[in-house]
Image (cartoon, helix red, strand yellow):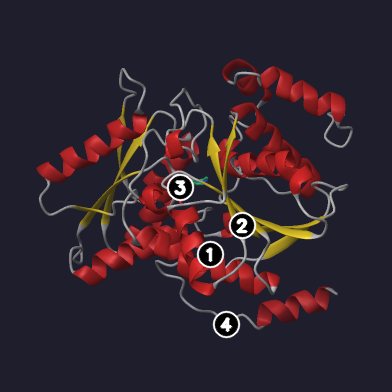
């Protein structure tokens, strides 16, 4: 059995990864919802080089800028990021020989900021504006920087068709290839909506029957949502992004932060997958939808990022109790109702 592992590894040639994403595995999850009569699968994009699906997005955004001639050798890229795209862009820019300026806000995980800096990015920290709309404040700072530095370019993640193209040509086809067939349901979290839109484009292009469920945060403005305070980065947006105008998920699920945390904790304890808040939101959305699935339905989701950067927040009881509405109850409910996740 061990020998098999070695031989698998030996068949993988040494190739340069450079500024690129990795194809990732899909795993069957049998312990997350043991009583549900569904086939549940997760695509492990936390295994990307910078720890998130955004490695795919970054590659397509940078390839597009390079191909158009807008980004020349030694050039500077500016982008607003909640963390993951910033880490992926920082990594790929340094590898490709570009400078990168990351416009970030106070909600970004400290580990994400340190990672960007480690890759040589310059961080522009935008304070939370009076109206609380951090995303808009970041986008305005990007525009101000571009006006000051005429040779700098932006990847425009909120409206750039290269963003969904990454997922239409890699994420969704890989998912289907791993499963051997299109899933009945696909759950993805939304912020720019690039991932959802790209998966939707692949579904439409190939005529797959998959129902796409977009998972959003309570307090996000996407799809007519009411804007409210959000503490966790990754999913949700403070305005309706340009890309979202073309995204038409079969259903949108809005998830409270306390339920994202429960989703993350249960995924870690039952399946040994340490994921970020948006994946926890997906787990919560699937849990909510369990009664509606047909028997034996194939349900797939994306693990958008890993959980290490969320150890001080999502996985920290003190922080959850102090910062999250309903956080104490969420932790107590894990302990009370579920011996599997109970603390020893
Ligand atoms: C952890 C995580 N999950 C989900 C998303 C949403 O992806 P998209 O921007 O493609 O909608 C993001 C985007 O930043 C993210 O960082």
Residue highlighted by disc 3 = 84
Q: Earlier in the sequence, mark 2 or mark 4?
A: 4
Circle 4 packing at 10 Å, graded few (<14), some (14-19), many (20+), is few
Query: Gap between marks 1 and 4, in whole Å?
Result: 22 Å
From the viewer's side, name the closer residue of 156 and 95. 156
Residue highlighted by disc 2 = 211
> Which disc is residue 171 wearing?
1
In the rendered image, residue 100, in percent from the top left (x then y), is placed at 28, 51
Q: Which of marks 1 and 2 is nearer the N terminus?
A: 1
SS under mark 3: helix
Circle 3 packing at 10 Å, graded few (<14), some (14-19), many (20+), is many
The quadrant holding residue 322 is top right
Foreground: disc 3 or disc 1: 1
Residue drawn at the location 34% of the way across and 60% of the way down: 161
User: Disc 1, disc 4: CB below 8 Å?
Assistant: no
Name the quarter where the N terminus is drawn.
Answer: bottom right
Q: Earlier in the sequence, mark 3 or mark 4?
A: 4
Residue highlighted by disc 4 = 13
From the viewer's side, name the closer residue of 199 and 78. 199
Residue drawn at the location 54% of the way across and 79% of the way down: 14
SS under mark 1: helix
Say whether residue 129 is left or right of residue 227: left
Q: Is residue 60 above or below residue 139?
A: below
Q: Ligand 1 within 8 A of label 3's CB?
A: yes
The quadrant holding residue 191 is top left
């Amino acid at each position: 059995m061990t020998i098999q592992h070695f031989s698998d590894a030996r068949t993988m040639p040494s190739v340069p990864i450079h500024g690129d994403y990795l194809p990732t595995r899909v795993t069957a999850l049998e312990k997350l919802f043991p009583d549900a009569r569904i086939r549940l699968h997760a695509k492990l994009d936390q295994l990307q080089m910078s720890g998130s699906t955004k490695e795919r997005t970054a590659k397509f955004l940078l390839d597009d800028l390079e191909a158009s001639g807008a980004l020349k050798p030694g050039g500077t890229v500016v982008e607003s990021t909640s963390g993951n795209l910033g880490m992926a862009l920082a990594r790929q820019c340094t590898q490709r020989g570009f400078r990168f300026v990351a416009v970030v806000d106070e909600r970004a995980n400290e580990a994400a900021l340190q990672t960007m800096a480690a890759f040589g990015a310059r961080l522009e920290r935008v304070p939370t504006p009076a109206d609380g709309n951090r995303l808009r404040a970041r986008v305005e700072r990007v525009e101000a920087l571009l006006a000051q530095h005429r040779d700098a370019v932006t990847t425009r993640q909120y409206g750039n068709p290269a963003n969904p193209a990454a997922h239409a040509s890699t994420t969704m086809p890989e998912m289907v290839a791993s499963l051997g067939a299109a899933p009945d349901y696909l759950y993805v979290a939304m912020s720019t909506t690039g991932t959802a839109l790209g998966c939707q484009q692949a579904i439409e292009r190939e005529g797959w029957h998959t129902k796409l469920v977009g998972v959003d945060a309570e307090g996000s403005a996407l799809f007519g949502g009411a804007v409210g305070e959000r503490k966790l980065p990754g999913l949700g947006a403070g305005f309706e992004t340009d890309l979202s105008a073309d995204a038409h998920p079969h259903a949108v699920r809005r998830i409270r932060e306390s339920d994202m945390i429960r989703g993350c904790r249960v995924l870690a304890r039952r399946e040994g997958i340490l994921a970020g808040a948006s994946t926890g939101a997906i787990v919560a959305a699937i849990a909510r939808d369990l009664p509606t699935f047909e028997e034996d339905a194939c349900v797939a989701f994306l693990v958008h990022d890993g959980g290490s950067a969320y150890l001080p927040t999502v996985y920290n009881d003190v922080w959850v109790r102090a910062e999250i509405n309903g956080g104490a109850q969420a932790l107590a409910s894990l302990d009370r109702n579920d011996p599997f996740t109970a603390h020893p």
